[in-house]
Image: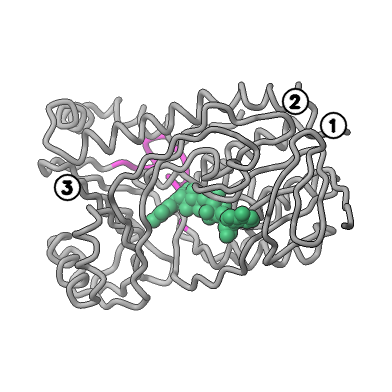
Amino acid sequence: MAGLKFDIVIAGKGLTGRIAAIAMAKLGFTVALIEKTCRKDNTPRLYAISPPNWLWLGTLGLIDETALATPAKTMIITSISGRQLRLSSDMARRPALAYFIDESVLIQKARHLLGESAITLFDDAAIIKVETEEVAIFLEDKHIHGKLILIADGAFSKLRALAGIEADIHDYGEDAIVAEFVPEKSHQNEAWQWFGNQEILACLPKEDGKISIVWSLKRNLALQYANPNALTRRLESKVSHRFGKLALTSPIAQYPLYKVNVPNLALGRFFLLGDAAHAIHPLAGYGLNLALDDLRALAAILSNQTDPGAASLLLAMAKKRQLFDQTVSALIDNMHRYFTQQSFLGDCLFAVAKQVPAMQRALVTLALEDHAP
Ligand SMILES: Cc1cc2nc3c(=O)[nH]c(=O)nc-3n(C[C@H](O)[C@H](O)[C@H](O)COP(=O)(O)OP(=O)(O)OC[C@H]3O[C@@H](n4cnc5c(N)ncnc54)[C@H](O)[C@@H]3O)c2cc1C
């Protein structure tokens, strides 16, 4: 069986794996990227990318001036009891709260960069076993050695299990419905979010005038909205006809929602990234951003290193990121718990934030801080 050697081997060609490969190759490492399937998911997905991550993606060549993206300056959040909070990037004197970009744009750019670089791709490759002592990954017909193995094969990571890394997986019992609509009335580049009884709806503005929705609901209810007519009518009424009539222009996709917590991000020469390390509820649009925060920190730590899998580096990296990642995960979990049911605490927080402009400014400033210093 042939053996191949790389500085860094990455499992999983989702956005985390692709961007990790591009970032690591840019540091001068030899990189292999392994994917078990050739995904053909043509559901339109929109990502909110934080301003620091947006800038970083630009330095990697993943975003340029031709990328169709919407800078969101304003976000209007409505609580379960109907209190409305309007947050604006002007409160922190910044150009945008986040940038909304189609997944297809990011994937297309990443494909181009992967093709141009010396990254070795193994598509349709099944990982059969790993050897933690020699740090090798076995595919059907070859084994691949890496000084560092980045595990980015998603929430139900097979490689994480093969490497013997513990993970706690929690099922929210919810699905997120994702779809796109042409609204009769302009979205005015504003992002909207409604918290309801065991549901959260986000309506996000797109450059082409459409809105993209992410609507998380209890799984049995989400099933009823697989019907285009039922979804459209229910949505129009849910948003109080704010956008006028809505015309569905995409397939309706449903994503089951899970939380993944991993007590240790590093084990030997393995390091976890993306949903394999920390899947979170999409209510804050931060799952990919968390992966990008981690990746920026990893790129900073590995710059100018000859052995990217050295224990001292990976442990320093894990120490640096673990607390932050777990804090974000816990914060989002608590927002989910207190804002999707009538709760004194949740209502108080909204009431105070609505009345106190300094708190609104503090919230926006905190959200826009760079989380990978
Ligand atoms: C509805 C919804 C909306 C969201 N919106 C946002 C947002 O606006 N902003 C944001 O930051 N985040 C958002 N997120 C979170 C974001 O989508 C995820 O955090 C991100 O996509 C995770 O990417 P990943 O590459 O880590 O995992 P995945 O996308 O799951 O990719 C894992 C890859 O590994 C491959 N794989 C699996 N098993 C193996 C194996 N054995 N060997 C090799 N490869 C394997 C899979 O085929 C896949 O290609 C959202 C999530 C949802 C559900």
Q: Earlier in the sequence, mark 3 or mark 2?
A: 3
Q: Is residue 309 left or right of residue 322?
A: right
Q: Is residue 198 left or right of residue 322?
A: left
Q: Quadrant of residue 305?
A: top right
Taking depth in this image into account, of 373 and 354 the one nearest to the observer is: 373
Give the residue number, with chain letter if any, for mark 1: 305
The residues tagged by marks 2 and 1 sit, at their Cα atoms, a distance apart of: 9 Å
Give amino acid for label 2.
Leu
Taking depth in this image into account, of 180 and 73 the one nearest to the observer is: 180
Give the residue number, with chain letter if any, for mark 2: 313
The residues tagged by marks 3 and 2 sit, at their Cα atoms, a distance apart of: 44 Å
Q: Is residue 155 visible?
A: yes
Q: Which residues are magenta?
A: 87-100
The number of numbered discs placed on residues in the rendered structure image is 3
Quarter of the picture containing the C terminus is: top right
Give amino acid for label 1.
Gln
Quick one: SS at disc 1?
loop
**Residue at left 50%, top 44%?**
50
Quick one: SS at disc 3?
strand
Q: Is residue 113 left or right of residue 225?
A: right
Q: Would you say the residues marked 2 and 1 are in contact, meaning their CB atoms lie under 8 Å apart? A: yes
- Residue 126 in the image, given as x and y percentages of width and height: 67, 60
